[in-house]
Image: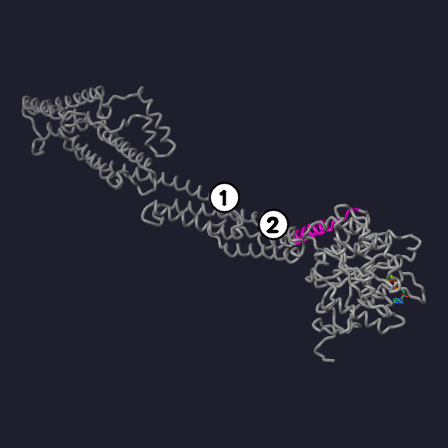
Amino acid sequence: MNENISPHSSSSSFVPIEEHHIQDAIQVINEAKEFNPNLLDYITKSTPSASNDKKYHVISVFGSQSTGKSTLLNRLFNTNFDVMDETRRQQTTKGIWMAYAPTVSNTKHLKSQNENIFVMDVEGTDGRERGEDQDFERKAALFALSTSEILIINVWETQIGLYQGANMGLLKTVFEVNLTLFGKAKLNKSNNHKVLLLFVIRDHIGVTPKENLASTVTQDLINMWDNLNKPNELSHMKFEDFFDISFHTLGHKVLQPENFANDVQLLGDRVINKDNAEYLFKPQYHHEIPIDGWTLYAENCWDQIDNNKDLDLPTQQILVAKFKCDEILSNVYEEFLLKFNEQHLIKIPKLNEKLTDDIDYEDLGLSFIDLKNDVLENFDVSASRYNQSIYEQKRITLIGKLNDKFKEIFEAYAQYLLGNTIKLFTNVLNSGKRNLPGKNFQDGVVSLSNKYTQEYSKALKFLSLGGELDTTGYEDKLNKQVEELISKQQLIELNNTINKSVKKVNNGLVKAITFELGDLKDDTWDTILNKFNQLTKEVLSKYESSTDEYDFGLGTSDKLNNLAIESFKFKSWVNFYDSIHKYILKDGLINILQDRFDDKFRYDDNGLPKLYENSTELESSFEKAKKFSLQILPILTRAKLSNGKDIKPEYDIFNKHLKQKYTTINETEQVQASYTDSEDEDEEISSDSFSIIVNEEEKQLVLNKFKREVDAKFVETKRSIIQHVTQ
Ligand code: GDP
Ligand code: MG
């Protein structure tokens, strides 16, 4: 023997029969008519390459006791069903038995082409003549019909044509029951399932040719079929709608042992050789149930047969498919959960734990998809062999379950990403305009928010199982929060801009006021007002845009911009008022008057101290100085222009509602302000409130004080003249 070829190698087609391990048969249904729960285990062990799925065949045998059924099966399929031993008269155990055929005998000694063949043998009793156990025989035959592709009907040549002897009586009953059980399913046009009835004619001496025997049997069957009691709706059904028939003859085992052996091998050829003209298996004999579902199917069939229920095969197949697909689904899902928990749960960082994360979302998303595909692949391998629509239905269920699980983790990441993105975005916003990209706030904020929302969307897309999980909810959430942050920051920036501008105007104005106060003239207020107008105009022109509106480069609305401009003007006027009062209070006023008085009274035109030599000179100078000083009193007490008109601010700066409206710009108070505008009338303040710096009463007090002080100076000076004169 060639050493390179192992006798057990599956690649070899010539494995001697003796080398195959012959497995003991297993009892499928026992004497008590119970189904064996260990059958699946037997089948699984017999067919370790489970991927063979639907590549298996079930053959059963049917016939009178001691007609050599078991002998034939053992010789043909190399099984070891109990055979009655003539010498010991050993009684075989009643029931339905099954055995895995390790190989099939054939003329070419070919291995059985990897087809998994299961053989069922029915052991009855010899008591049929006594009418004892026809029930079991009948049920066994029905069971064989509903689960097998081929039913071997074993008959002696000598019995052919004899009604009783050739099992014909039982066959008739079986046909009848078969019709009531499976007939309805046949009404469905797409149901083309058939069973092959293989008549094996035993002890064929060879005198009558096989063809003649076959036509006798066929004729008998057709007659029997025609005389069956058929339910009305099935009366049109023909024998060949349910069955194919085929024949095989075997020589006499005792008288022609060589012929017998050869005929068995010829039958084996018909079982395994697809090229054989008389090859037995046709696709429509198969029940289209994967091998791992067959036992469940068989058990259901037995249950219904034993309980004399209507046996609805297609429904049985669907039930098996549902059960099996569910089982496969929960198995793959369990496996998935283990992997899922192992790979993903612990990795989500705590929210805002750090601002930059090093998670590769593309990688992570791909691992989600990989895991999901693996699970689906596992499911497909096992479940796709079952009824297609059930399989597809369950696949959708599985996808839903997987997506739900991934959704949990997706949501956790989405939540985390949302929080992180917002925090990052807020940080950049808060760190000041300078840290924004682009030339102004609006540009910067737009490109920044685009950058962040794009990154966020990208990460979510990666995690979305190729778009199967909906990301829009989270995107909307982010957009909303970003928008809120931006509008909040816009207001802050807008207020800052306004306040800076107001300060700028005020600085300029204060300079002008202090300068003008040093050299008061009739048109002092004209000069100051002009300066104010010029300063505000400079600011306004900075924000004027080509469209006649104002634009701060913040992306704020026209309405808000206009409000900001108003606020700027309003605040500038308030500052104008405050500055005047700061520099010209009644206490300050008295100093100004006194300084002015002193300037004239104590110093001459060259700035030298004056010495008075007589009272007349003193009195005249005193009156002059007093007049000179009081000359500016109207200018300092009232902001009046040289044309005699008071300076009137553009806004009623004393209106507390306006004050509130313009102090800090925010969107809500605009609305509030709009209705408070109309109820101001009762607190109307006179239109000259702005221009009055010191009121009449205060003015009188100032005057009195001034007079007292200058009078004192006058007296003091006069006294010094008298002393000087008298010395
Ligand atoms: P089963 O009850 O139908 O399974 O029959 P067995 O296989 O147990 O065989 C019953 C008896 O018939 C045994 O003694 C066999 O030796 C004998 N026998 C088996 N096959 C043949 C056959 O082809 N011709 C004859 N004449 N006897 C056979
Ligand atoms: Mg037997």
| Label 1 lies in ligand 2 vicinity (Cβ under 8 Å) | no
User: Quadrant location of the N terminus?
Assistant: bottom right
Which of the four quarters of the rendered structure image does ligand 1 lie in?
Answer: bottom right
> Image quadrant of residue 343?
bottom right
Magenta-tinted stretch:
309-331
Is 177 situated left or right of 726 in this image?
right
Residue 285 percent across, percent down from the top left: 73, 58
Q: Nearer the viewer, residue 195 or 457?
A: 195
Q: Amino acid at mark 1?
A: Gly
Q: Residues within 10 Å of mark 1 (few under 14, many from 20)?
A: few
Is 524 situated left or right of 220 in this image?
left
Cβ–Cβ under 8 Å for marks 2 and 1: no
In this view, 561 is above or below 309 = above
What secondary structure predominates along the stretch shown in magenta? helix
Q: Nearer the viewer, residue 553 or 713?
A: 553
Q: Nearer the viewer, residue 550 or 18?
A: 18
Which residue is located at x 37 percent, y 28 percent? Answer: 672
Query: Which residue position holds label 1?
Result: 473
State yes or no: residue 491 in magenta: no
Residue 611 percent across, percent down from the top left: 7, 28
In this view, 542 is above or below 203 = above
Q: How is the image coloured?
A: one colour
User: Quadrant location of the C terminus?
Assistant: top left
Query: Which residue position holds label 2?
Result: 396
Which residue is located at x 82 percent, y 65 percent? Answer: 212
Q: Secondary structure at mark 1?
A: helix
